[in-house]
């Protein structure tokens, strides 16, 4: 590839340099009509300079380039029409409205105005000819357009039609589409006299068969009348794909820059501790699967290095990620450091605390425990153990990164169920282990970070992993421990509730245990608790001979732990719960799961809940007890769960149904808000994006940073990850 320009501020082609300032250097207030107040509103749209205005791309387009005969209109169709008013009257129904009957040679329709002025009423008179634009819908009098845009046609050819498709931009309160179109028109007119940098090297653009940037931007802001609206709406036009590639590249570059920043500073090298690991493995009641062995070896190799490990471990429900995390923790502890694991819920943190105590205390390792609901004296005691280093393995919730928590020597942070945490929460825990150290080679002070292990039981589709987790090395535990039985899933209407209650009774009579999960649309712990309590009371009346427990988020931590222990010990046969049991609950004797109103939950959450059963050798079942009627999307979700128990298959379906923002969860909130790219639609680009990002950072770092600034600007949330 040929050498690029020495500066990212030079054009990438051979055109003469323009002496005018580049568009990214000109403030948005330079545009006519943009004062302080409008500039503040534009800032909300991340439009701060003229380049930002160019990269504020249309969401969709309106075709105002041709007049459609009224007789050719269909419901939900937006169009320009012309006709003569046959009648116009104020109608008094449930709402007062002004109704005009408009007719051309092919048919007629009604224009309806719920908000109108006296002058408007006087202007819309019988015999007046109008050109209108709006969306047709079925009404009481046939096709209607509510509040159309309209103009009077006093002379036959007085008004000219638009020459290009009309863009519809993302907007905010106080900025109209007309204003955005006028501003974009001003900036487009400056493209001939001001520079806009082509940041992709010329050879690369030719290799990828990509059109020039300016050509693509001009086209997308003002597509010609013959442009394919369908292709534009689908985001598959070559000019859109040109910009989508650049945007995906900017996100990937941001993640790689973040990784490079983190790994440039170093971490404590943690040599493998053979004796300690062998002792631990000999105490386990099971053997590791080959997948666990493989992933553990990858982690061991990372921890031996003096650069921070950044590894994501994916494993389906029940694949044994916690044991892999324990092996990593032992490598840190065996070298005299501390390890911490952070879980999103107290139930999961308590479960981990029990497991790590059972595994580590026979090895002489003290396990600390820190959650937000510990009593003052217990919290003070745990903080002292952590600060002194006496607690070598620390298990907790968000409380681990709160102010006042001081670690003696934290070398490894483990984040469980990463999608429940935000980027900055992960950063906050990492910061607890940051320390200064003397570099043995340079004798200069160097910043050391803890190693990071991030785990998820919600498999991430390959396309998302390549784009959203480019800063992490990925490992997959793709094998379940022997003896696990597949869970049979059935979808049943709530009208058959009594049959399901009888089924629960039969399972408990056979010595098995069951879950009954209550869900609500509202994200309210209080309302969820009420729903669960009502179900608990109903089931107690229907099944008086069965010991039934109740658990929800409103209970105190000690109460939740006591109920979970009673269920695990077999003292409770049926557990009524909210989705608080989604992760971390491991009761091998539980073989039946009832999920009430599953249509209210996403696929990943349903798959997690289902994973609470099937942990023993008995045949297990999950009943999705839905309320009719089901929407098309809900039916697709439930059928997907019924047809597959493979978490990766379900994750791909979830991505298809809900999109990347929802599938990724909190970790990526705000990070995946693309202007034009679409992870699913543009997945075919990701391999090329990944290789291009690596090449740019190595050979053209200034262009790489300029691309990040262009597309992410203030939203470069990865900058300090």
Image (cartoon, rainbow, N blue to C red):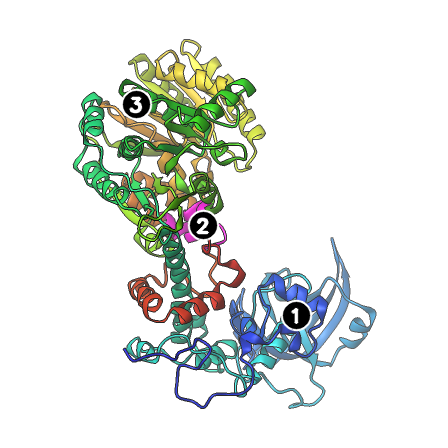
Q: Secondary structure at mark 3?
A: helix
The residue beneath circle 3 is: 360
Tag shown at residue 148: 1
- Asked where in the image residue 4 lies, by quadrant, the reply is bottom left
**Where does the N terminus fall, quadrant-wise?**
bottom left
Earlier sequence position, callout 1 versus callout 2:
1
Q: Among all residues in the image, which is located at the extreme front?
A: 443
Instruction: Answer whether residue 655 is magenta in the image.
Output: yes
- Return the x and y of residue 392 as percentages of the image width and height: 36, 27
Question: Is 312 in front, or is 672?
Answer: 312
How far across and how far down the image is residue 186, in percent?
61, 81
Of the image marks 3 and 2, the number of the one nearer the N terminus: 3
Q: Which residues are magenta?
A: 654-671
Q: What is the x, y in percent for residue 124? A: 76, 75
Residue at the image point whose x is 29% and y is 80% from the top: 2
Answer with mark 3 or mark 1, whichever residue precedes in sequence.
1
* Image location (x, y in percent) of residue 558: 49, 18
Is there CB contact under 8 Å for labels 3 and 1?
A: no
**231, 190: nearer the viewer:** 190
> Would you say the magenta stretch is mainly helix, strand or loop?
helix
Q: CA distance from mark 3 to mark 2?
A: 34 Å
Task: Left or right? Give the position of 530 relative to 426.
Answer: right
The image quadrant that residue 403 belongs to is top right
Q: Residue at x 78, y 72 (%)?
A: 120
Q: CA distance from mark 3 to mark 1?
A: 72 Å
Residue linked to disc 2: 668
Q: Which residue lies most toward the top here? A: 545
Indicate the secondary structure of the residue bearing disc 1.
Answer: loop
219 left or right of 82 in image: left
Whether residue 378 is situated above or below residue 485 in the rendered picture: above
User: The residue tagged with tag 2: helix, strand or loop?
Assistant: helix
């Amino acid at each position: 590839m040929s050498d690029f320009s020495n500066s990212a501020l030079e054009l990438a082609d051979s055109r003469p340099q323009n002496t005018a300032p580049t568009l990214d250097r000109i403030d948005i207030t330079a545009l006519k009509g943009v004062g302080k107040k409008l500039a503040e509103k534009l800032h909300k749209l991340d439009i701060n300079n003229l380049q930002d205005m160019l990269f504020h791309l249309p969401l969709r387009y309106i075709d105002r380039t041709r007049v459609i005969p009224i007789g050719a209109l269909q419901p939900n169709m937006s169009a320009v029409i012309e006709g003569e008013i046959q009648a116009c009257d104020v109608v008094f129904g449930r709402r007062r409205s002004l109704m005009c009957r408009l007719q051309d040679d092919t048919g007629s329709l009604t224009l309806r105005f719920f908000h109108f002025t006296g002058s408007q009423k006087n202007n819309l008179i019988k015999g007046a000819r109008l050109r209108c634009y709006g969306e047709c819908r079925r009404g009481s009098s046939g096709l209607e357009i509510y509040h159309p845009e309209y103009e009077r046609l006093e002379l036959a050819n007085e008004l000219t039609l638009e020459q290009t498709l009309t863009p519809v931009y993302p907007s905010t309160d106080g900025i109209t589409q007309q204003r955005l179109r006028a501003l974009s028109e001003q900036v487009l007119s400056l493209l001939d006299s001001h520079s806009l940098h082509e940041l992709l090297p010329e050879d690369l653009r030719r290799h990828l068969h990509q059109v020039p940037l300016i050509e693509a931007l001009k086209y997308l802001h003002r597509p010609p009348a013959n442009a394919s609206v369908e292709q534009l709406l689908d985001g598959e036009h070559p000019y859109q794909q040109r910009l989508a590639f650049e945007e995906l590249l900017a996100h990937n570059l941001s993640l790689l820059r973040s990784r490079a920043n983190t790994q440039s500073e170093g971490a404590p090298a943690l040599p493998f501790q053979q004796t300690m690991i062998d002792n631990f493995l000999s105490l386990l009641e099971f053997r590791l699967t080959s997948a666990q062995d493989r992933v553990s070896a990858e982690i061991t190799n990372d921890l031996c290095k003096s650069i921070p490990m950044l590894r994501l471990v994916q494993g389906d429900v029940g694949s044994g990620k916690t044991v892999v995390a324990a092996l990593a923790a032992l490598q840190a502890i065996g070298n005299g450091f501390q390890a911490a694991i952070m879980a999103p819920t107290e139930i999961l943190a308590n479960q981990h605390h029990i497991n790590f105590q059972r595994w580590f205390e026979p090895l002489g390792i003290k396990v600390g425990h820190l959650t937000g609901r510990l009593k003052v004296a217990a919290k003070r005691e745990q903080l002292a153990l952590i600060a002194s280093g006496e607690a070598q393995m620390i298990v907790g919730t968000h409380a681990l990164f709160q102010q006042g928590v001081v670690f003696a020597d934290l070398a490894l942070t483990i984040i469980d169920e990463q999608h429940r945490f935000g980027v900055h929460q992960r950063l906050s825990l990492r910061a607890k282990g940051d320390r200064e150290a003397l570099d043995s080679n340079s004798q200069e002070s160097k910043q050391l970070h803890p190693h990071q292990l991030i785990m998820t039981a919600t498999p991430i589709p390959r396309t998302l992993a390549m784009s959203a987790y480019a800063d992490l090395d990925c490992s997959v535990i793709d094998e379940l421990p022997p003896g696990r039985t597949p869970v049979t899933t059935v979808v049943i209407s709530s009208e058959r509730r009594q049959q399901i209650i009888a089924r629960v009774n039969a399972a408990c009579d056979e010595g098995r245990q069951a879950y009954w999960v209550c869900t609500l649309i509202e994200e309210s712990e209080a309302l969820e608790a009420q729903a669960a309590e009502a179900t608990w009371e109903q089931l107690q009346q229907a099944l008086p001979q069965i010991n039934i427990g109740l658990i929800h988020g409103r209970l105190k931590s000690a109460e939740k732990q006591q109920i979970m222990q009673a269920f695990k010990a077999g003292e409770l046969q049926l557990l009524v719960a909210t989705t608080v049991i989604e992760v971390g609950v491991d009761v091998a004797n539980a073989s039946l799961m009832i999920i009430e109103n599953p249509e209210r939950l996403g696929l990943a959450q349903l798959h997690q809940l289902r994973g609470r059963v099937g942990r023993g050798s008995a045949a297990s079942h999950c009943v999705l007890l839905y309320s009719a009627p089901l929407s098309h999307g809900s039916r697709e979700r439930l059928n997907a769960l019924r047809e597959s128990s493979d978490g990766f298959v379900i994750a791909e379906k979830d991505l298809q149904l809900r999109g990347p923002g929802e599938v990724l969860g909190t970790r990526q909130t705000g990070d995946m808000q693309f202007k034009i790219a679409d992870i699913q639609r543009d997945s075919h680009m990701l391999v090329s994006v990944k290789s291009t990002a690596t090449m740019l950072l190595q050979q053209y770092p200034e262009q790489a940073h300029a691309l990040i600034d262009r597309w992410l600007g203030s939203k470069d949330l990865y900058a300090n990850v």
